[in-house]
Each structure stands twice: as structure tokens, then as C-alpha cells.
Amino acid sequence: MQPLLIYDGRCGFCRIWIDYWKRLTGDRIDFAPSQEVGSRFPQIPAGAFAQAVQLVRPDGSVASGARAVFETLGREGIYESSSFIAAFTEGAYRFIAKRRSFFYWLTRLTFGKRIEPARFALTQWLFLRVLAAIYIVAFASLAVQVTGLLGEHGISPAHDFLGRVGTSLGWMRFWAAPSLFWINSTDKILVGAAWMGVGLGAVLFIGRLERLALVLLYVLYLSFSLAGQEFLSFQWDALLLETGFLAIFFGHTIVTQRTIAWLFRWLAFRLYFLSGFVKLASGDPNWRSLSALDFHYWTQPLPTVVAWYADKLPRGFQHFSTFMVLAIELGAPFLIFMPRRIRFFGAGLLLSLEALIFLTGNYTFFNLLAAAITLFLFDDQALRGLVWTPRRVREWLMAEPARTGRAGRLAAAALTLLILPLGLARIFENIRGGLPEPMETLARYSSPFQVVNSYGLFAVMTTERLEIVIEGSDDGQQWRAYEFPYKPGDVNRAPRWAAPHQPRLDWQMWFAALGDYRTNPWFVAFVERLLEGSPEVVALLEKNPFPDHPPHYIRAVTYDYKFSTWEERRRTGAWWHREPHGEYLPPVGFRSTASRY
């Protein structure tokens, strides 16, 4: 009464794939080994069962080989669509059938002994918990800094920035800078919005109103990103927005799960591959000569104490490590699209790289977010025994996913047609330095929403570390230094651990040292706030040498910093060695020394 697929029961390769096809077809097809049922079908020569699978249709007719496989899986339309496809697939089937022993071991190596239809319900559930935690950290970190950075008396007030954008762009400002803070950007609103983000992250973490929470989290973080100017223009801010946007489209149907999993793999590919590509494409001799890690540990923005010890490893090991970084970033991304066990190996390489970066550098939530995206290189079968879930959630995850309706398929296709070409545009942009007009237009109109971005840190390795030390004085003769909570200052203070929190002012000070105050207007505004004694800005610092009144004068000088040697550390206790370098900002002050408060 229904089709019967007959296969060689002694063939291990056949048994693995037949078991997989049973899961795909449900009760639509019957399966039986030829050793048990072959004698019932005298119209099929006995030797045919050893050469190819045989599909006996309800009317008694028989299909074999590739044709039988396509019909079994309900894809006969593909087979019949072209004589070339039919001929090619039959040839491929015969090639594999003659080498079943080899392909058995290849299947074991790449897929394992048991193949299951790819499902991503557990992967999706775990990812959302990690994403929720990252959102909580990102918003909480911002909440304790936002008034000092973007508030009315902060370094770069959001209200003033949005006012300038509105004046120059008119009604187009809502597209060029889509932010909720056009409505109101007072200090209370900024702080309240940040803590609202923390609350929404908690709602997402416990699994309530997930899609609504994801939409609101994306909109809130996009609003901060656009109003935050240079203080929220880091690559991990863009990555969080792109990740959060994709997560909005999570669903529980088969097509939705697989589409979103594939798009996250596409994001992982772009993130890692571009990170490696820009290093070589920049022409920086330190990457090409494998000497980049001779400098990286102490020249990176905010090293951890682990970086001090990593810097003391032998130079040969540093060069080997540089080679491995490039090899993993350029090679492992291509394993993302390989069969599952090879893909798992690639995921292991990428996760190991992220762990090492996390240990040696304070890159906020970047490494956690990159690791979370890499989760989609796994499937439910791989994670099932590793991830604990509540019983209620476990029962829901084990349920058969719903079939995807027409609307769901169209939505998945539309999302893919948006994300795929935009991602290709970003890759093309890095390789060619420009885009063809249609791609340029698409990228330009979508860029304010940051749904697809370009990535790549440390394209050019810095080989020296200039640290800006800000000093204040009441008389222009005696100068006292301000101390930042995380960036190097006091040479006897060990590098501190900040991640996943991001001290955004400390980070910007590293970038400021790469130029001068004329190219960093925010730095001049920062000095002005210190002269005013702005409590919101002073709160961003660890040590204020003028607790009773703001200084009359401010200056900024630079020092050349390097990690201390083993001998210096034993002799002086210092973690850093520094030498005077020059003046960054000459002494400045208000004509009136009275505080503006």
C-alpha cells in the first residue's frame, strides 16, 4: 500500500544512511533489507540489490539508484527537472556504490555512526540564554557610565550631538540615526533606558516574551549606539546589534531553525575570516613576518595580568602563535560549512582562540559574543548531553518541530536574501576597497541599522605604547596626575581585569594616544569637564587628585610604556616600565578659575 525501499542489509554504509532516511520520511516509506524481502520481488534480479537500492512503488514498478533516493526523500522534482541532473546524480551514485567501504569510513569520520536530521532547538535555547547575559552585562556596564559619557554634563552630550544631526539633516535624521533618544535624551532617560535594557535581558534569560524582548533590546541598543558617538562605535557594539537582529527571527519550525542557524554560521564566517584577511591585506610587516605577538600583549588597549606572563614566552613560541592566529582566522572559517564532525573541529579551533584572547586582553563582551555565535556550528545532537535544561524546557525541546507554512518559508527566504548579499558586500568591500553601485546602494541604506557589518581587529599591529597621563595644577608649577580605573598609569599597579565590563573612557584614551588632541575633539571636551569639576565625568576616574575643587590648569603628557622584565619586577615590584615621551596637550585653563557649578 506504500513504497518500500530495499537495501543491502550487510552494507554498513547503507545502514547508516537508511537509518537517517527513516527519520526524514517518518511512516511515509517502508524500509527492509534485501536479505529478508528480496525473494518476494522476482522482477528484481538478485544481483541488483548489491549494486543499488531498489524502490518498489505501490503499483509494483521499481526505481533504483539515484532516482530511488530522490523519490524516497520526496525530491523527485529535482531529479526530473533536468536530464543533466539525472545523469550526474546517477553517475555519482554509481561511483559511491562501488566504493562503499571507503565512504563508510568517510561517513564515520565526518558524521559519526548515527546521523540525525539537524535540529537547533537546544542550540537556539542555549544561545538565547548567553545572548541575554551579554545584553545584561552590556547595558549594566553602560548604565554606570552613561551620564559621564553622554549626559548633559558628560564628555559628549547626546542631546548636543542629536541637535547638530537634526539641524544638518532635517527629517532625514530619523533614517540616518534611528534612535529613541530623539524623543528625549535627558540624564534620567539615558540611565533609565540602560537599566531597562538590563531588565529586558533578564526577561529574555528566563524565557518570557522572548521575541518582544529581543525587538526592544535591539531597538534600545541601536538607539544608544547611534547617540553614543565614538564611545559606542566599537566592533563588538556592531556585532551585538547584528546578532540581536538575527535572533529576533528565531522560531520553532524546521525551516526557521535551519535558516537562522545557517545565517549565524554565515556571520561567524565573516567575523573570523575578515579578522584574518585584514591583517594580511594591510601589508603590515609584523603580521607577514609573524612578529606581531612580540608587541601585541603590551600594546593592546587593556591587557590583563595574564598578558604580562604571556609576553615573557620565548620569541619562537610567539612567532608560532602568530602563525596559528592567522591560520585559524583564515582557515577555520571554511570548516564552518563542512560536514558536522569537521565543523566541530573548526568550532574547537575558533573557541580555543577566543578563550586565549579572553585571558590576555580585556575585550569586553566581544569574546563571549563571538563564542556564542560559534555555538551554531553545533546542533542539538552534539549539545544534548552537555547542556542542562529544566525539565519543562527539556520536554519542549524534545517535541517534534512544527512544519513551516508558506508565510514562514517566505519570511526565511526574505531574510536570507537580505543578509546574504549584504554579507557578500562587506567581504567584497574589504577585498576590492569598493562596491558595485547596486550593492553600494543596498549597503548605504541599511547601514544605519547595523544589521550586517564589517569586522577585523588589529589590521596594523602597534609596536609602541604611548600612554596619555592627564595632570592638574593650581599654580602651573606643581602637577598631580589623574588615575584611570583600568588603563595603565601607576607602573606598580598590575594590569586589571575588566571584561566583560567595558570602561569606555579608558578604551578611548588608547585610541587618543594614536593621534593628537586636534583629531579627538572629545578629548578636549573631557579636559574641559575636568576643569569644570563635572562630578559625572570625575566619577569615571579612579583617582581625583583635586577632591575639593577642580584644578586651575590641565595638561596632558605622554609616556612610552612597556611591560617590565622579570628582573625589574623582582627588583622594583613594577609591572610597567615607562619613559617620558612628550607633550600631548599644553597647559590649558579657564580665564576665570571659578567652577561653573
Image: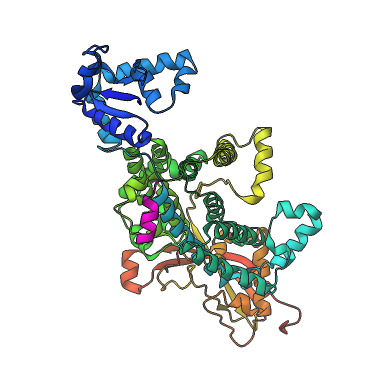
Q: Is residue 29 above or below residue 449?
A: above
Picture coordinates of residue 436 (x, y %)?
65, 32
Q: Is residue 432 above or below residue 321?
A: above
Asked if the stretch drawn in magenta spans residue 171, the answer is no
Residue situated in front as seen by the camera: 512 or 121: 121
**Relative horizontal placement of residue 67, taking residue 476 as reference (left or right):** left
**Relative horizontal placement of residue 41, taking residue 436 as reference (left or right):** left
Picture coordinates of residue 366 (x, y %)?
47, 56
Q: Is residue 306 above or below residue 284?
A: below
* Res. 546 image quadrant: bottom right
* Res. 40 image quadrant: top left
- Rendered image coloring scheme: rainbow
Q: Label the magenta part by its dominant secondary structure.
A: helix
Residue situated in front as seen by the camera: 118 or 439: 118
Residue situated in front as seen by the camera: 508 or 200: 200
Picture coordinates of residue 257 (x, y %)?
46, 45
Picture coordinates of residue 38 (x, y %)?
22, 19
In the image, what residue occupies the spot 61% across and 65% down? 584
Task: Pick the quarter of the image with the N terminus.
Answer: top left
| Magenta extent | 391-400
Q: Is residue 370 above or below residue 133?
A: above
Asked if the stretch drawn in magenta spans residue 396, the answer is yes
* Res. 592 image quadrant: bottom right
User: Does the rendering let one see residue 290?
Assistant: no
In the image, what residue occupies the spot 50% across and 18% down? 81
